[in-house]
Image (cartoon, rainbow, N blue to C red):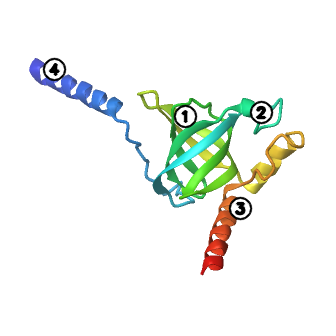
Amino acid sequence: MRKAIEKKEHRKTQKKVAMASRTKVRRQAPSARHPRRFVRIEISSPVTFVPFRLPLTRPLGTPADGTWMGKILNISGGGILLETDTWVEPADYMLLRIGMFENCHLENVVGRVKRSENCGDGKCLVGIEFLTREMMQHLQSDLPDGFLPAGAGIFDEKLRELLSRQIFSKQKTA
């Protein structure tokens, strides 16, 4: 009986160690109560960002802000999952530059950090929610004029703008 208990405890310990050593992102399936609003697309795409916290004491986008780098693991209309070496606090904001296609980037997309999780090896997973129009208006109303860079905006409008430019440039060359 004692050997059976020891064996069971050994298996539990091995399972915990295996789970802790995984660096793979575990995704939770949407439940019937909380279905996902957006389809997630798994990609590996570069992103640069400037994290910021309210209240801002000076305008963003200056060289003093510093730029951090990361890699997008998945993206949806509602946000991204980012892997980075930089720890960012939940409820902070980010000014993002997202690499979408070769030589095409979405500039000055604003997002809010929903979660940060240390995954070992100095890496962090950061869940970022793109701001909606209402959230963006609220954020801008809390800031003095000029504190966000010109053209800072929401993801769907920035994506629409990028796709329009891509289509227009292809039509010009055809």
Q: Nearer the viewer, mark 1 or mark 4?
A: 1
Residue 21, position in %: x, y? Answer: 33, 30
Identify residue type, mark 2.
Leu
Q: Is residue 3 visible?
A: yes
Q: Earlier in the sequence, mark 3 or mark 4?
A: 4
The local crowd at label 4, few if under 14, some if 14 to 19, many if 20 or more residues have their Cα within 10 Å, is few
Q: Is residue 31 visible?
A: no
Q: Kindly report the distance in space between the C-alpha atoms of the residues bearing marks 1 and 3.
A: 26 Å
Q: Kindly report the distance in space between the C-alpha atoms of the residues bearing marks 3 and 4.
A: 59 Å
Residue occupied by mark 4 = 6
- Residue at 71% x, 61% y is 157
Residue occupied by mark 3 = 157
Please tell me whether mark 1 sits on a helix, a strand or a loop: strand
Q: Is residue 87 above or below residue 160?
A: above
Please tell me whether mark 3 sits on a helix, a strand or a loop: helix
* Along the viewing direction, whichever of 130 and 145 lies nearer the viewer: 145
Q: Earlier in the sequence, mark 4 or mark 2?
A: 4
**Label pair 3/2, CB-CB below 8 angstroms:** no
Residue occupied by mark 2 = 54
Q: Kindly report the distance in space between the C-alpha atoms of the residues bearing marks 4 and 2.
A: 52 Å
- In the picture, which quadrant includes the N terminus? top left
Q: Kindly report the distance in space between the C-alpha atoms of the residues bearing marks 1 and 4.
A: 36 Å
Identify residue type, mark 1.
Ser
Q: Earlier in the sequence, mark 2 or mark 1?
A: 2
Identify residue type, mark 4.
Glu
